[in-house]
Image: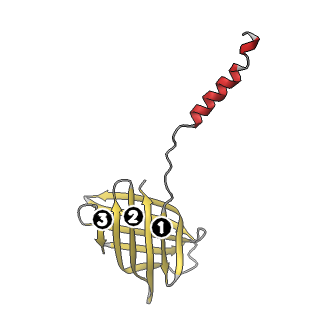
Amino acid sequence: MPMKFRWLMPAFFAGIAGLTSCEKKETVPQDAFSFKVDGMAYNANQIFTEIIDTAGKKALIVDGVSNNFVNHQELIVFFPDVIKPGTNTRASLTLMNIKQEGVGYITSTLTVNITSINSKYAEGTFTGTLTSGETEKPLTDGTFKVYIH
C-alpha cells in the first residue's frame, strides 16, 4: 500500500467502530414494587413478573425481594375472565422473612387498582390489611410498575 494512504486504514476502522456503536439500544425502564406495612417501607430491588394461565384462569404475579434480601414479597392478582384494567379484590399479597427470623404476613383484605396492563407491562396501586396470627397491620401506599417477562 502506498505510504500516502496508510493513514486511511486507522481512520477507516475508527469510522466503522463509531458507526456500530451508534446502533439504537433498547432500554427497559426500571421495575418498581413497593408498599408500607404499619408505616414501614418495603421496596423490592429484585423483581420478576409474569402472567400465568392455568386451565383458563389467568393471574398476574409480581414477585420481589426487599430490604437487602431480608424479605420476600409477592402480589398475585386473579382475573375472572379477561386480563384488563380495573379494581380487583381477587388478589393476595404475602410478605415473608427469607431467613425465617421474623413473622410472615398474608393479606386478609386487599384491593388492587390496575391502571394499565398488556402482555408486556402492568401498573397499579393497592391497599389492604396484612395478618399474622392474631396481629393485623395496615398495608398502604402499594404501587407497582413492572415489565412482564
Residue 33's tag is 1
Q: Position of residue 93 (x, y in %)?
A: 41, 73
In contact (CB < 8 Å): disc 3 and disc 1: no
- How crowded is the residue under tag 2: few (<14 C-alpha within 10 Å), some, or many (20+)? some
Q: Where does the N terminus fall, quadrant-wise?
A: top right
Q: Please state if 80 lies on the left or on the right of 130 as rendered.
A: left
**Residue 12 occupies which quadrant of the picture?**
top right
Residue in front for this viewpoint, 1 or 130: 1
Q: Earlier along the polypeptide chain: callout 3 or callout 1?
A: 1
> Type of residue at label 3?
Pro
Q: Residue at x 49, y 78 (%)?
A: 36
Q: Residue at x 34, y 67 (%)?
A: 114
Residue 85's tag is 3
Distance from the alpha carbon under mark 3 to that under mark 1: 17 Å
Q: Which residue was labeled with disc 2?
A: 123
> Type of residue at label 1?
Phe
- How crowded is the residue under tag 1: few (<14 C-alpha within 10 Å), some, or many (20+)? many
Q: Position of residue 110 (x, y in %)?
A: 36, 78
On screen, residue 26 above or below 43: above
